[in-house]
Amino acid sequence: MASYSTNEFRNGLKIMQDNEPCIIVENEFVRPGKGQAFARAKLKYLLTGRMVERTFKSGESVEAADVMDQDMEYLYTDGEFWHFMDPASFEQVAADAKAVGDNAQWLIEQDTCMVTTWNGNPIVITPPIQVTLEVTDTDPGLKGDTSGGGNKPATCNTGAVVNVPLFVQIGEKIKVDTRTGTYAGRAK
Amino acid sequence: MTHWQPTASINTLRQRADTLKQVRTFFQQRQVMEVDTPALMPHTVTDPYMTALSVDVLQQKMYLQTSPEYAMKRLLAAGSGDIYQLAKNYRADEQGRKHQPEFTLLEWYRLGWDHHQLMDEVYELVSEITGITKRTNITYQQAFIDHLSLDPTVITGEVLSERAEQLLGELPDNMLREDYLSLLFAEKIEPIIAEQRITFVYDFPASQSSLARLLSDKTVAGRFECYCNGLELANGFWELTDAKEQMQRFQHDQTVRQTLDRPSVDIDQAFIAALEHGLPDCSGVALGFDRLLMLALNKSDIRDVLPFAR
């Protein structure tokens, strides 16, 4: 089984802890005085998102997690699974609601998403940083107001609800930052 | 494209050059002689947790020195008087925001001084270079009592390990008492005791005496460390001069190495012989020069003060 020494620790490295895949978010080498050296790591459990601090003796070996990040095209959802395709091999994978989570609201067919797999199964779906959505419902608001003072909620074609400026109307396309869920401008 | 640019800016390197000069002037004014002992020597330290790099030189195994301590003490035994050195040192497996496998130590020795006199001089140097003038002196025991409400001299192993996991999250198995204490110290005390002040922690437990002599009641050693803004800057000793006791400590290191399953290291007999001849009563300190620059220039990564760092 593949493993890493703590000397190879760096941010982004994926390791196994308690039989679960984790990603190293922060890592610091500590040698207090003249004693034993340690690697102090902040880990994020990929399945639950839980963050923990963990200390290893320097030089200790830790099992590597068979976790891969791959860019894939989002195809469709059948209500239970979200289907993605590797654009090179045309191979398809199906991600469940646990893997997709709240990101379902940012999935647009044919967009390229990052699919994180563990032992070949999708565990995390990361949408593009910016997506273009169509407004399907919003308060008509004050017509002709283009000054942009004030916001209103708008429901989009994916079900996402985004705060938009008052001038945005039903049927318009808008850009949204998926990291924060905030309006990033009108789309052409 | 191959990355070829230095890790430190040319401006920082100019400040590094100025600081090197400042250090040399500091010691010149105090009549301390500069020496430069070899980076390559036939022996290395027995410290259980230190790994030296070795190279083959004309079919002989030589070690890149982890500190210039043994060679400088041989000079002291030979009658050098007060000496200092700006030495490149090497340690395998040390890399991080504050560590590099190759780094510069400023090490110096003062004859007839105890560790308190040397702490004063360390303060003068650090303060001259960084402009930081506030100072705190605290014993190792008091630092634990004040900041973690635990007394390291009486706490039981069980309570200690429990407290440590409470404060630090899950820790490795097979931790020694010293490991818990050092880790708590490094993570929970060191970062807060030295905010904008040059802080000396002194009188370490005898179990962490290293090459310092034990003080009268034998429970603590004449060892100090200097911290500032979360950086461990220096480690100093009122030096052990007793060759027999030194030999026992080396042998103890060997035993610890064995239990840790680490390769044993030949004891440096030339160093022991120098002690047998007679090391004058003295105190010595090793100060991380690169870290001193980090402090002076307000840099959070050691790579920012080195021309080509890993």
Image (spheres, helix red, strand yellow):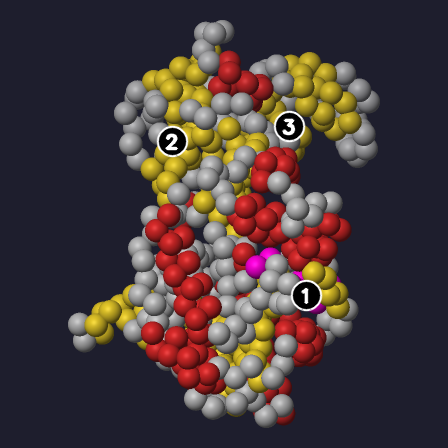
Please give the name of the residue rendered at 37% of the width and 58% of the height, measured from the top-left corner: B254
Residue bearing the label numbered 1:
B200
Q: CA separation, marks 3 and 1?
A: 49 Å
Residue bearing the label numbered 2:
A65
SS under mark 1 = strand
Label 3: chain letter: A
Instruction: Check the image and report above or below for B79 versus A34.
Output: below
Please give the name of the residue rendered at 39% of the width and 75% of the height, measured from the top-left corner: B272
Residue bearing the label numbered 3:
A181
Please give the name of the residue rendered at 72% of the width and 26% of the height, measured from the top-left corner: A164
The kind of residue on which mark 1 rests is: Phe
- As drawn, which residue projects farthest toward the left? B59
The kind of residue on which mark 2 rests is: Ala
Neighbourhood count class around disc 1 (C-alpha, 10 Å): few under 14, some 14–19, many 20 upward: many
The stretch drawn in magenta includes residue B253:
no
Label 1: chain letter: B
The kind of residue on which mark 3 rests is: Gly
Residue A95 makes an appearance in the image:
yes
Residue A71, percent from left and from top? 40, 30
The stretch drawn in magenta includes residue B201:
yes
Of the two numbered discs 2 and 3 in the rendering, the one whose residue sits closer to the viewer: 2
Please give the name of the residue rendered at 34% of the width and 74% of the height, measured from the top-left corner: B269
Neighbourhood count class around disc 2 (C-alpha, 10 Å): few under 14, some 14–19, many 20 upward: many
The quarter of the picture where the N terminus of chain B appears is bottom left
Q: Which of the two residues, B297 or B172, is positioned nearer the viewer here?
A: B172
Q: Please name the predominant secondary structure of the magenta segment in the image.
A: strand
